[in-house]
Amino acid sequence: MKMRQLRFLRDQKRKKILEQHSKKKVEERSENKGISKNLGENLDFLKNVFGNSTDIITRTFTMKTPEHSTGAVIYIDEMVNKDITHNYILRPLMQEEIKDQTDIWKNIVQKLIEAGEVKEITKMKDVINGILSGDTIFLLEGTTRALVIGTKGWATRSVGEPRAESVVRGPREGLSETSTFSLAMIRHRFKDPDLRIQSFVIGERTQTAVSLLYVEGLTNEQIVETARNRLKDIKIDGILETGYLEEFLQDQTWTPFPQIQNTERPDSVVAHLLEGRIAILVDGSPHALIAPAVFTQFYNSPEDYYERYLISSFLRLIRLCSFAIALLLPAFYIAFVSFHPELIPDQLSIAMAAGRASVPFPSIVEALVMEGSIEVLREASIRLPGPIGPTIGIVGGLVIGTSAVQAGLVSPAIVIVVGMTTISSYANPSYNAAISIRLLRFPLMIAASILGLFGIMISLMLMVLHMVQIRSFGVPYMTPFAPFRRGAIRDTLVRVPWKYMNTRPSFLKPQDRYRQKNQSSEEAVKTGRDASNDTK
């Protein structure tokens, strides 16, 4: 009890420091901060707020006035309508001459700015909000006022749901192959000036643009620095897709398990950024890389956070059962048929024996042939043009199913086993994680054919030992189970209601641990046993 109280006091002190830091940052952007007459001071303030994000465009210029006044426009690339910005704001300001110097500001507002929506402001907070909303800001040397010019017009493409991550409830748009469009989609959802975008050029010949995204003051600096160094160390002729980077960035090469998640959904990218992860975009690919990644993360769908917690938890348990079936069912079939028939109920054993009476192959050959045929059929249906794919599926089903059984090449039981295994593998929301399970299925089948259930248990033990040794940007792959993190369990196998997930995952070591700062400390202790339990 005393240790719990000490942890509570320590955590409250840490929370107070974080709140003071957050309050200080808010005060810097609040209405108390007015626009300075010094243009350079205003630009330095905005640069400090937004960091060195490469999508923040600042254009300074000299106007044709008697005093050669200096002005500047600031906007976010690809969130504005560039035709309006260039032709109706920048061109008149830079080319039109103002002879009347009695009121230059009035002449600019009434005669030069040709855009329809113009609003005059005097606070830096409104400047920041205008930039993040997709407007263009005009600042002038020697005045404490600024103009918010309506230029919203971020690039969009025809609405199409990402094929690899379809959901019933949730946004339908996916990331674009053009990284600037993808950044605009993310900025549209993440209106926080602390979002940092650092650009790299990787590929000696392709000169591919790569963007590293993180949230300053939230994401662990060690993770950001690790990603930054690994990106700088990549020396290759060309980067054509995020898969190139994934192999360079992962901690361990010789493993079938993915250590970096990829997603096509901008809402998923924003959700991971809010948890304290980093995202990496590659120009030319509609997929974003998310790191660090843990094992349970690949079995969570974005839809889990859009539905009520009971439905989400039920669906996660279904995916967990599907994972076990896809990995173990063929191996258990081989073990029971070849080594442990006494474990099968009598009536089922008689039916299986009658089905296998005319099969000339042992169960391992039967299972390997069927599984191999399914993999070939699956690959063929993906590679063929759309109209032909369903036809191949129908023909393959007839050949692998009915015809193979009638010819006496396989038993009816193995057709059912392979069918359930294939269906279960499709329940995984992550494509690369599903491929890993399909790959590991074959060693388990071979182990089961040699030692039966003992072979399966030994293989599973080796698999778990391998998984607990994996790291993703320094984060243990089996977190929050090994090492155990009690607080992070609330969003793994099941999902608790949002009001109880008041802290971010502790294993990511975010600088700002609290995602719900308005919740009282007493309620946090009563409902979630406080965030200090995350460290246990």
Image (spheres, grey):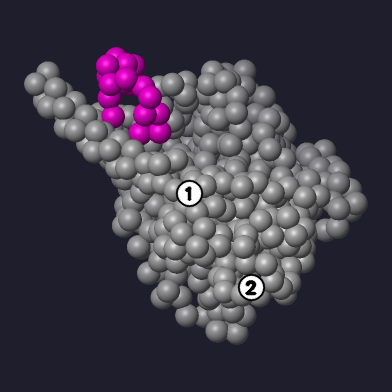
Up-down: is 4 above or below 147? above
Q: Name the amino acid type tagged 2.
A: Thr
Q: Which quarter of the figure is the C terminus placed in?
A: top left
Q: Residue at x 69, y 71 (%)?
A: 99
1 or 2: mark nearer the eye = 2
Q: Badge 2, how many Cα within 10 Å: few under 14, some, many 20+?
A: some
Q: Going by the picture, which residue comes out furthest to the left?
A: 2
Up-down: is 294 above or below 307? below
Does 218 lie within the magenta span? no
Can residue 371 be seen in this snapshot?
no
**Residue placed most toward the observer, 510 or 44:** 44
Q: Which residue is mark 1?
A: 124
- Displayed quadrant of residue 524: top left
All told, the count of numbered labels is 2
Q: Secondary structure at mark 1?
A: helix
Q: Name the amino acid type tagged 1.
A: Met
Does 525 lie within the magenta span? yes
At which x and y percent is residue 71? 57, 67
At which x and y percent is residue 463? 39, 47
Res 65 label: 2
Res 522 label: none
At which x and y percent is residue 288? 57, 55
Q: Which residues are magenta?
A: 513-531
Left or right: where 271 falls relative to 182: left
Q: Which quarter of the figure is the N terminus placed in?
A: top left
